[in-house]
Amino acid sequence: MLRHCSFRRQKRKREEKPPCLRDAKQRKKGDVVASTSVKKEDLKKTKKIEEAVITLKPRGIPPVPNVQARAIFMLDKASLRKGLIRKRWKILNSEEDADFLLKQKKNLNDYRPDIVHEAVRAIFDSPLNRAGMVGAVYVKIDNGVWFEIKTHVRIPRTCKRFCGVMLKLLEKSCIRDKDTGEILIRVIEEPVIPSNSRIVGLSYSSEKLVDIEDYVCAASDDLNLVFVVGTMVNGKINRENTDDFVSISNYPLGSRCCMGQICEALEQKWKIY
């Protein structure tokens, strides 16, 4: 009986409380849920936007069904040499491994993987590649090994990560997509060049100086232009199999700058903005 009376008193106290105080807890809970639901909606919208950005084609790129030609890049004498440091294999870099290389009496200029990394990024990040106008990218290491990079691959942003991928490539001969198993980068015997192609070697040492924009504009749209560019500090590319050997500047250019000028000239030619 006493329990029953105390229960009634508690009930009366709850009823006597103002509605604002009585529903305060419920409103607080509701507010938290509402704010959480808003955040979830925002996250969903953000995800949709991110997915759209990934799948969306760059604006201002007109369709080019009549242009059958593609640009092909061959990067020569890339410095990607393996070395064992502290019981661990890695791609040697003159910045990180200078002490080790100097003890071995090596030339630091022969260990510059950053040059080929920047050159590859210049190609893959260009509107030319995003428009699908790059046919193939081949890289030749200074030891004679060739490998191909598929044009839809996302190149690592840092040289350190790029060197990690290159080390894996040299060990396994190919890099596959984890989800689909598609081969993204692979070691090959030699590049496959289409028959209707003109192989153009670029070097500062060439006596034939050309304006790169005029040069590519003069080429037929049915002709694939294959550009051979060196990715070393010193030396020249092999010009034996080239159809033309030109220089595009009165000054020595880095590989990244050279790639940028070529891509920009082709973008102007095919109206890719």
Image (tube, rainbow, N blue to C red):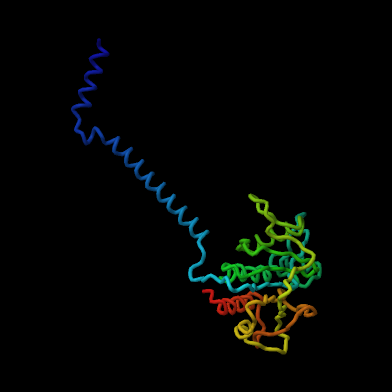
Query: Furthest-top residue in view?
Result: 1
Q: Residue at x 52, y 64 (%)?
A: 57
Residue 159 falls left or right of residue 27? right
**Residue 226 percent location from the top left of the image:** 69, 75
**Residue 174 percent location from the top left of the image:** 73, 57
**Total numbered labels:** 0
Residue 14 falls left or right of residue 59? left
Residue 271 falls left or right of residue 254? left
Asked which quadrant contains residue 203, the reply is: bottom right
**Residue 159 percent location from the top left of the image:** 65, 64
Q: Is residue 61 above or below residue 27?
A: below
Residue 270 falls left or right of residue 139? left
Asked which quadrant contains residue 232, the reply is: bottom right
Q: Residue at x 54, y 74 (%)?
A: 272
Q: Is residue 59 above or below residue 20?
A: below
**Residue 74 percent location from the top left of the image:** 71, 72
Query: Furthest-front residue in view?
Result: 66
Q: Residue at x 71, y 66 (%)?
A: 93
Q: Residue at x 78, y 61 (%)?
A: 83
Asked which quadrant contains residue 217, the reply is: bottom right
Q: Quadrant of the N terminus?
A: top left
**Foreground pick, 159 / 243:** 243
Q: Is residue 116 above or below residue 184?
A: below
**Foreground pick, 233 / 217:** 217
